[in-house]
Image: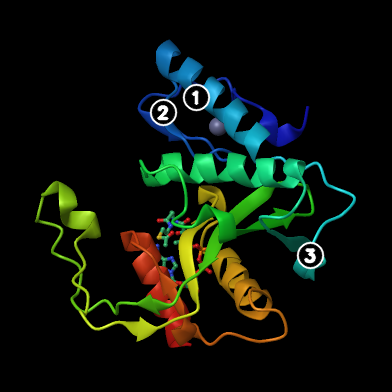
């Protein structure tokens, strides 16, 4: 077993109140047996899904010494598509998406960010689109407790031409704010249309979360 698969950190002291697992990111109460059992189950399932064993034929679209980004397309072998699907399910569960498929699953490509220790730390799903609607208003205030608050951006009613829609972008929570999402975006821009490089205004984010909007506005501004 790898060291970071360790479930219980036992330094002799008792933990009261919530603790956060450094490898799966779950926050739970270490003093509750029920919570710990739930964490153990979640932890194991998550790390299994995020493990990348490696394939003979990979489509690497960007890499450095300790990471690489793979692109998985609809015509790829089943084992690759199955892995992409597994990661998407996990991302959808975290985002609270009910809908089970991207808008056009038959044409969507999945990008996986894989670390040198064979873990998937980020995922992006991109699909071809023709138009997008610019977000106009700032997010509603946090005091607004309505359920729709998170998705209630106001959009312009006249469509702008666009080429690539980002239907999901996700980074494993312990690894956020280390440029992983930015690298995934750079990889999409240089690989989504063969032989061309997309500008940020040719890319649109569908239904962004508050995190997604903060990221997108920063990434697209540079
Ligand atoms: N708050 C404020 N600014 C942010 C945030 C944030 N949560 N996330 C990114 N930024 C800005 C920062 O300026 C950041 O640079 P800095 O860290 O030097 O300040 C810059 O964007 C680049 O950020 P990255 O490190 O490249 O982004 P990261 O790898 O952390 O991933 C992501 C961002 C994907 C939004 C991540 O927070 C995440 O997975 N969140 C949960 C899932 C989610 O909500 N995804 C978006 C769904 S919307 C959609 O899928 C279309
Ligand atoms: Zn854990």
Q: Is residue 159 shown to the viewer in this render?
A: yes
Q: CA distance from mark 2 to mark 3?
A: 37 Å
Note whether 153 is above or below 4 in the view shown.
below
| Front disc: 1 or 3 | 3
User: Any atom of ligand 2 within 8 Å of the CB at mark 1?
Assistant: yes
In this view, 50 is above or below 159 = above
Question: Which residue is disc 3 drawn over?
Answer: 60
Marks 1 and 3 sit apart, C-alpha to C-alpha, by 33 Å
Return the residue nearer the eye: 144 or 25: 144
> What residue is shown with label 2?
28
10 Å crowding of disc 1: few (<14), some (14-19), many (20+): many
Identify residue for label 1: 39
Quarter occupied by residue 197: bottom right
- Marks 1 and 2 close (CB-CB < 8 Å): yes
What residue lies at 50% left-to-right and 49% top-to-bottom?
173
Q: Does the residue at mark 2 contact the one at mark 3 (Cβ under 8 Å)?
A: no
């Amino acid at each position: 077993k790898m060291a970071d698969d360790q479930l219980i950190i036992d330094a002799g002291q008792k933990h009261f109140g919530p603790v956060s697992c450094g490898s799966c990111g779950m926050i739970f109460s270490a003093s509750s047996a029920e919570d710990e059992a739930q964490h153990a189950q979640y932890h194991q399932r998550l790390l299994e899904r995020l493990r990348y064993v490696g394939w003979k034929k990979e489509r690497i679209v960007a890499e450095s010494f300790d990471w690489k980004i793979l692109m998985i397309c609809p015509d790829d072998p089943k084992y690759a598509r199955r892995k992409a699907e597994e990661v998407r399910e996990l991302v959808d569960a975290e985002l609270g998406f009910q809908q089970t498929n991207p808008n056009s699953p038959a044409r969507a490509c999945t990008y996986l960010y894989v670390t040198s220790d064979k873990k998937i730390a980020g995922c992006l799903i991109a699909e071809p689109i023709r138009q997008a609607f610019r977000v106009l208003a700032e997010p509603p205030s946090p005091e607004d407790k309505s359920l729709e608050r998170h998705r209630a951006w106001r959009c312009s009613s006249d469509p702008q031409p666009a080429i690539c829609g980002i239907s999901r972008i996700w980074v494993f929570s312990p690894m956020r704010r280390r440029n992983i999402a930015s690298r995934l975006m750079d990889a999409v821009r240089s690989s989504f249309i063969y032989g061309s490089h997309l500008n940020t205004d040719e890319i649109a984010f569908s239904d962004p979360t508050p995190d997604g909007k903060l990221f997108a506005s920063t990434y697209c501004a540079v």
